[in-house]
């Protein structure tokens, strides 16, 4: 796992450590010292901790004019034992929402497991942004993670679907990825009617 870096090709567009509105502003990364772990496995030092012992994030893009953020995640999402959604919501999402972000895309390629509890914080997050035209998308969910999240009822508040897979998302520009996710959503909505 130590070889899996957060997506870095958009760094000419956005760097969370250089964004004064980001919860990770001012962070300094040691490229040679591996200290964060998911269980016994060290992870790349570019991942940001936010309070969880098993889940790490990287804000890889934020556009305050467009009210959009793309966050990549790695590890095990455990709401049952450690209430990871609480830490993510309070230490990352709430700070971004206060800065006007209401459209979130969570890239879930490297979220290896999910253990659910209840949907209260997901509901709160949804209610914080829905009146402003906001959304939450989870992109590239592994099938067993998707199944567990649906069992918890998260899909009532988060746009998630097994078909929302863009495996080559790193080849997109940030705005291109946002457009692809929104276009997928529009096609799905048209099929419902």
Image (cartoon, rainbow, N blue to C red):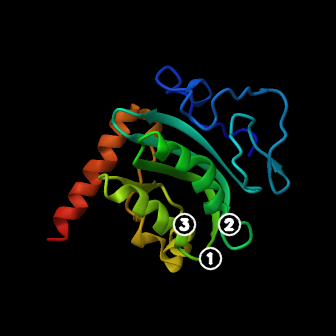
Residues at discs 2 and 3 in contact (Cβ within 8 Å): yes
Q: Secondary structure at mark 3?
A: helix
Image position, residue 74 (x, y; %): 64, 50
Q: CA distance from mark 1 to mark 2?
A: 8 Å
> Looking at the image, which residue is at 42% across and 62% down?
126
Q: Is residue 134 above or below residue 46?
A: below
Q: Residue at x 66, y 56 (%)?
A: 87
Instruction: Locate residue 5, reporting x and y percent.
Output: 65, 36
Q: Look at mark 1 in the image and give the residue it sits on.
A: 117
Q: Percent x, y for residue 151?
A: 52, 80
Viewer-proximal residue among 92 and 165: 92
State the residue lying farthest toward the left: 193
The circle on residue 176 is none
* Spatial CA span between label 1 and label 3: 10 Å
What label sits on residue 83 in the rendered view? 2
Work out whether 140 lies above or below 44. below
Rounded to the nearest angstrom, the CA distance separating label 2 from label 3 is 10 Å
> In the picture, which quadrant includes the C terminus?
bottom left
Whichever of callouts 2 and 3 sits on the residue coming sooner in the sequence is 2
Crowding around mark 1 (Cα neighbors within 10 Å: few <14, some 14 to 19, many 20+) is: some
Q: Say whether residue 11 is left or right of residue 113.
A: left
Q: Secondary structure at mark 1?
A: loop
Q: Are marks 1 and 2 in contact (CB under 8 Å)?
A: yes
Please name the residue shown 85% across and 54% down the image: 40
Task: Tell me the crowding category of disc 2: few under 14, some 14 to 19, or many 20 or more residues within 10 angstroms, Cα based.
Answer: some
Query: Which sits earlier in the primary sequence, circle 1 or circle 2?
Result: 2
- 13 relative to 56, above or below: above
Q: Which residue is mark 3?
A: 121
Q: Compare residues 39 and 116 and report the one nearer the observer.
A: 116
Picture residue at 53% right of the left edge, 24% below the top: 11
In depth, the one of 163 and 78 nearer the eye is 78
């Amino acid at each position: 796992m130590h070889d899996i870096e957060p997506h870095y090709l958009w760094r000419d567009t956005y760097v969370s450590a250089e964004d004064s509105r980001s919860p990770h502003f001012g962070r300094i990364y040691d490229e040679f010292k591996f200290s964060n772990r998911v269980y016994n496995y060290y992870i790349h030092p570019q991942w940001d901790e936010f309070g969880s012992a098993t889940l790490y994030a990287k804000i890889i893009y934020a556009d305050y004019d467009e009210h959009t953020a793309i966050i990549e995640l790695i590890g095990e999402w455990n709401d049952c034992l450690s209430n990871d959604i609480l830490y993510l919501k309070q230490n990352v999402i709430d700070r971004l929402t206060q800065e006007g972000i209401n459209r979130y895309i969570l890239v879930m390629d490297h979220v290896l497991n999910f253990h659910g509890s209840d949907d209260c914080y997901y509901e709160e997050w949804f209610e914080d942004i829905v009146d402003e035209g906001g959304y939450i998308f989870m992109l590239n969910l592994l099938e067993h993670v998707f199944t567990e999240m649906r069992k918890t009822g998260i899909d009532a508040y988060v746009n998630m679907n097994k078909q929302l897979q863009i495996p080559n998302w790193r080849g997109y520009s940030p705005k291109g990825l946002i457009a692809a996710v929104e276009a997928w959503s529009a096609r799905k909505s048209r099929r419902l009617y």
